[in-house]
Image (cartoon, grey):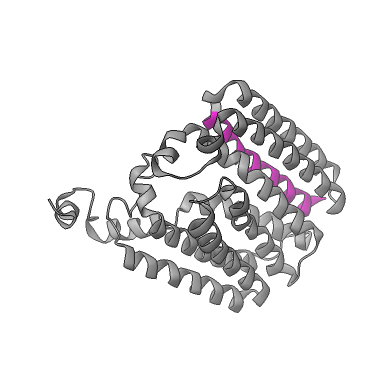
């Protein structure tokens, strides 16, 4: 049976109706990942303003960030469709299930990226637009096309793309960058490896099957857990540096300290309980949300 026949007869292949087609394109943008990126953008904007920066500016920045991140994720889906097809965790995505074909998906991603740049330039400023588009290009060309399939440092260096929204948010408010946004960038940069290495511990066989050189595949579980612990220590240290460099309040210091202790305890427990990798992965999402929530509260009330 030809691949074309498989696509026609596979009940997953063609989404039914307008809602199904729209849903498939929305899924290409990986909305859950975008949510986490935007969670970091607004606190950065609040800290930059030391107050609420204005509802329209926040909405405009979030729209632009969503377009750019969605474009990057859609293009990533096209490039990684061969990997996604053999990994159980990703086999349900629109490309492996042929709900969207590569060419329209690629055009969709490019248009989103262009739209994000134009929107941010028109509604915020050129620096925010350039930073957002630079993150898209970095994610596509440096992470997806180069590092992901060639280096165990893929998620380490590639994490720079996911850390960029704080720079975009700060630039949208001030039109410039200072020490504080770069520290927030570094916090997300060092948070990313423990977060995704925990996921790769859980799905090591998936990555091995797909030929992706994630750390557990190449160097084993013990080396991965040691690296998670090391990056976790550096992450927590950076959150405390932000207290001094960002002129934060004792509220932030207390929040960062308590959250940091919990994060380190989770990393330590993972050393002897590999089966809790997904618990640590899920907690790391909550950790980042709560930490940046504390940054937002600090900017608004302290």
Residue 284, magenta (yes or no): yes
Instruction: Left or right? Give the position of 80 relative to 241.
Output: left
Q: Is residue 177 magenta?
A: no
Q: Nearer the viewer, residue 276 or 146?
A: 146
**258 over 300 or under it: above or below:** above
Give the magenta-colored segment's residue range.
277-302
For the question of whether residue 219 can be seen, the reply is yes
State the residue at coordinates (43%, 62%).
75
Find residue 268 and report its horizontal and vertical position in percent.
67, 26
Kindly report the secondary structure that dominates the magenta region of the rendered protein: helix
Q: Against 283, is 138 above or below?
A: below
Q: Is residue 46 above or below residue 90?
A: below
In the displayed orientation, state which residue is furthest to the left: 1
In the figure, residue 105 lies in which quadrant? bottom left
Give the percent coordinates (x, y) of residue 274.
55, 25
Residue at 48%, 32% (x, y): give it: 202
| Residue occupying image coordinates x 47% and y 53% | 31
Place of residue 27 in the rendered image (x, y in percent of width and height, measured from the top left): 39, 54
Is residue 100 left or right of 287 when viewed as pictured? Answer: left
Query: Does residue 203 show up?
Result: no
Identity of the residue drawn at 69% across and 62% down: 167
Give the x, y percent position of residue 240.
Answer: 81, 43
Residue 23 relative to residue 53: left or right? left
- Please tell me which residue lies in front, 301 or 14: 14
Q: Is residue 248 left or right of residue 184?
A: right
């Amino acid at each position: 049976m030809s691949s074309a026949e498989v696509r026609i007869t596979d009940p997953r292949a063609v989404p039914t109706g307008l809602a199904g087609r729209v849903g498939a394109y929305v899924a290409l943008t990986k909305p859950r990942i975008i949510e986490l990126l935007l969670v970091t953008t607004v606190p950065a904007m609040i800290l930059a303003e030391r107050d609420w920066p204005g509802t329209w500016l926040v909405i405009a920045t979030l729209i632009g960030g969503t377009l750019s991140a969605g474009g990057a994720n859609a293009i990533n889906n096209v490039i990684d469709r061969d990997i996604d097809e053999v990994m159980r965790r990703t086999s349900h995505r629109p490309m492996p299930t042929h709900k969207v074909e590569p060419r329209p998906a690629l055009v969709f991603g490019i248009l989103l990226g262009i739209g994000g740049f134009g929107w941010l330039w028109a509604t915020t400023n050129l620096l925010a637009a350039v930073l957002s588009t630079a993150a898209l290009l970095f994610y596509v060309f440096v992470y997806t096309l180069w590092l992901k399939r060639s280096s165990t440092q893929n998620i380490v260096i590639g994490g720079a793309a996911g850390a960029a929204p704080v720079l975009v948010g700060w630039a949208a408010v001030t039109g410039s960058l200072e020490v504080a946004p770069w520290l927030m960038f570094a916090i997300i940069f060092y948070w990313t490896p423990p977060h995704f290495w925990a996921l790769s511990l859980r799905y090591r066989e998936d990555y091995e099957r797909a030929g992706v050189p994630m750390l557990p595949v190449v160097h084993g579980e013990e080396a991965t857990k040691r690296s998670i612990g090391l990056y976790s220590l550096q992450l927590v240290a950076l959150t405390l540096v932000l207290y001094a460099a960002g002129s934060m309040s004792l509220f932030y210091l207390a929040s960062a300290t308590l959250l940091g202790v919990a994060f380190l305890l989770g990393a330590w427990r993972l050393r002897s309980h590999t089966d809790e990798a997904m618990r640590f992965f899920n907690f790391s999402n909550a950790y980042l949300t709560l930490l940046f929530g504390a940054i937002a509260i600090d900017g608004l009330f302290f």
